[in-house]
Amino acid sequence: MSRQLQLPLTDAQVTSLRAGDELELSGVVLTGRDQACARIFTLLQNRQPLPVELKDRLIYFVGPSPARPGEAIGSAGPTTSGRMNRFLPAMFDAGLRGVIGKGYLSQQAKDALVQHRGIYLGAIGGTGALLAQCITEVRIVAFEELLSEAVRLMQLERFPVVVLHDCHGGDLYADATTKGSDR
Amino acid sequence: MKTISFNQIREAIASMCQKANFELSQDVRDALAGGARAETKPLAKNTLLRILQNADVAAAKRVPMCQDTGLVVVFADVGQDVHVQGGLLGDAVNEGVRKGYREGFLRASVSPDPIVRGNTGDNTPAVLHVRLVLGDGLRLSLLAKGGGCENMSAFRMLTPADGVDAVTDFVVETAVLAGPNACPPIIVGVGIGGSFELSAVLAKRALLRRIGDVSPLPHVAELEQRIAQRINASGIGPQGYGGQTTALSVQIEAAPCHIASLPVSVNIECHAHRHQEALL
């Protein structure tokens, strides 16, 4: 049974989460991927203002397909998070609460997550049609010229995720191959 | 001599691009359903069931099953008695991709320059492999290949002395390293032999086979099964959440090679295996 959570997540909520927990998220997340995160990283390094606030937000690593007329969005599943590894420590420093994506994070990114009491949530890769049904509203807020890679605000409605890395160092991926996950 | 028009090719490609992205093929569905029946862990089972549910939604709503609608790779087997009229075969393929992706609301996922990056905006150009064959037909096989799994692919130049055990270890190692990044359950395309570049093309071509169609060479079919068993014993499971369904299939194409060489390429494909075929 999935636990229902409203965004933004509080400190207490994040601390209570454990790798393997199944959740349904409702509320607003930020989106971005390779090119947008690279730009955000550069702005942070140069101490320039960001076009969007990262504080207490989750970023969903997604490059959605175009919406058909009348739809909020096309297909919108997660992309591989590891490509954004090098940007994550700076983004957590800037107040980011967590990430929705899929795949391994580097040790450095995991350390930053634990240090900032962050959370890494997994959506099922390759189920963008299904996940799009849990996205009710989408608005581009930065880098529109990047097309699918533009930064968007997405309103989620009972969006299903699994906790991949919790803020205590718990790691669902490692559990799967070392001790055999019982979930 | 048979004449096939530029427009016929364009329309066939446009239609295949959409069908591939909206409709998960029956062989993949069957393999996923088999995995779901076999999994005992609820998270693994439910993940596979959600993937199947996603396929239903995608087909019903004509929404791509995955937002990464892929780089288009086309294998064209051109009969020597075919004349393509009205333009270049490669241009017809790209026109088809442009039309299929625009009209199907499919994502543009191609950078015009690997260093400068950016986006061509219409998912062109496609990658095209042309082979001359006997007859007067034009067979087009199309893959819309996602980036996440493609990124986990690998090549290694082994030696004859390394032998089949080293081939096995390398393929298993590649699939295990790919882990959750490649969106398991995966399909593993393997090219053994040929040359440096041919092994990679063979690995991709191996993905065109239907799941369940084993290699016609008994020793290769046996190797496919052995490698699949080892990958599935890794525990990675659906999406890396843990389970026994990590690879739906291992598909090997072998080719003659130099007496000094044993090239091996591994092309990883995700469960959202988008492939189509047309014969003109």
Image (cartoon, rainbow, N blue to C red):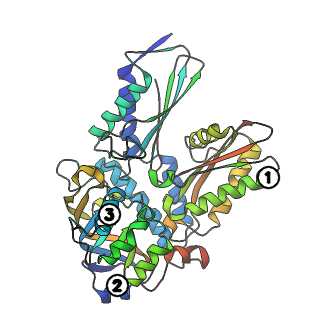
**A38 relative to B124, above or below:** below
Tell me which residue sits at (36%, 35%) in the image: B97
Q: Tell me what residue is drawn at x 43 percent, y 59 percent.
A: B51
Q: Mark 3 points at which residue?
A: A42
Q: Which of marks 2 and 1 is in front?
A: 1
Q: What element carries label 2?
A: helix
B217 and B261: which one is in front? B261
**Which residue is the site of mark 2?**
A14
- Amino acid type, residue under disc 2 in the picture: Val
SS type, badge 1 = loop
Q: Which corner quadrant of the image does residue A111 belong to?
A: bottom left
Q: In this view, does B22 lie above or below A57?
A: above
Measured in 3D between alpha carbons, the distance from the residue under mark 1 to the one under mark 3, in whole angstroms, is 46 Å
Residue B235 visible? The answer is: yes
The dot on residue B162 is 1
User: Could you tell whether B173 is left or right of B17 in the image?
Assistant: right
The residue lying toward the viewer, choosing from B261 and B191, is B261
Q: Mark 3 lies on which chain?
A: A
- Could you tell me which chain the residue with mark 1 belongs to? B
B147 lies left or right of B259: left
